[in-house]
Image: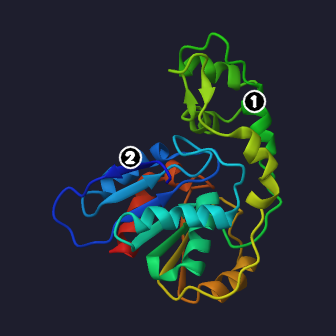
Amino acid sequence: MLATILHPAAGPSDAPTLVIAHGLYGSGRNWGVIARRLADRREVLAVDMRNHGDSPRFATQSYADMAADLAGVIAAHGGRADVLGHSMGGKAAMLLALTEGAMVNRLVVADIAPVAYAHDQSGHIAALRGLDLFGLTSRAAADRRLAATVPDPALRAFFLQSLDLQSTPPRWRINLDVLEAEMPGIIGWPQVTGHFDGPTLFLSGALSDYVLPEHRGAIIALFPRARFAKIPGAGHWLHAEKPRGFEETLRVFLG
């Protein structure tokens, strides 16, 4: 079973639980602020995907496996949920909806499409693996070292949330070896048939190139009730760059 972070509803609620599946190199704790705010009206469950955070380490990172992991979490929490997935987590959430549609009430796919990409993320693995962890005692020190290979401060901050400084020696809470080996499948998309008839929102960053007009045909074929929205001024990490706009759009759609 995946590790989860439960944010109980602030009061009595008949709204479905919201399950959040993070993207590559992330964890459930990345979504803490948004999850806590959305828990004012419903239970929110942020998961650590396999080979990330506190979840078990496995030899594979296929979307079939990740969708099955999410199904196990939902089955253990009532059997039906609203599901939000970002990037890699968005592809896993899409496959869950396509294969176990009865488990998904409403689906939100954040800045990803059901297509294969050429955005190879292996360079980030090299940067994380190359970080000298010896003697690190603070994220500030780790940030200074990582700046040599990751110039974007926002991206460094995102990566460093997965650095465990309490461990001796410090360690990454990400299975870099498996993610590197499985990267072709992670940036790809499995052959799948059928469709999900539930309400679906494809929510993208206006500055991102992950969901393009030419992807809409593939999206509508699989998700005929898909709606599309963009967050102005946001890129691929739209929930971190524009959290209030992201949250309000979610509220409208899920409400």
Examine the image and state in which quarter residue 141 appears.
top right
Residue carrying label 1: 129
- Residue 162 appears left or right of 29: right
Task: State the residue at coordinates (71%, 80%).
Answer: 192
Q: Which mark is residue 84?
A: none
Q: CA distance from mark 1 to mark 2?
A: 28 Å
Residue carrying label 2: 33
Closest to the observer, 142 or 231: 142
Task: State the residue at coordinates (69%, 73%).
Answer: 114
Examine the image and state in which quarter residue 118 appears.
bottom right
Q: Position of residue 158 (x, y in %)?
A: 58, 39
- Residue 44 appears left or right of 230: left
What sort of colour scheme is used for the picture?
rainbow
Q: Secondary structure under badge 1? A: helix
Q: Is residue 36 visible?
A: yes
Q: Is residue 222 above or below residue 190?
A: below
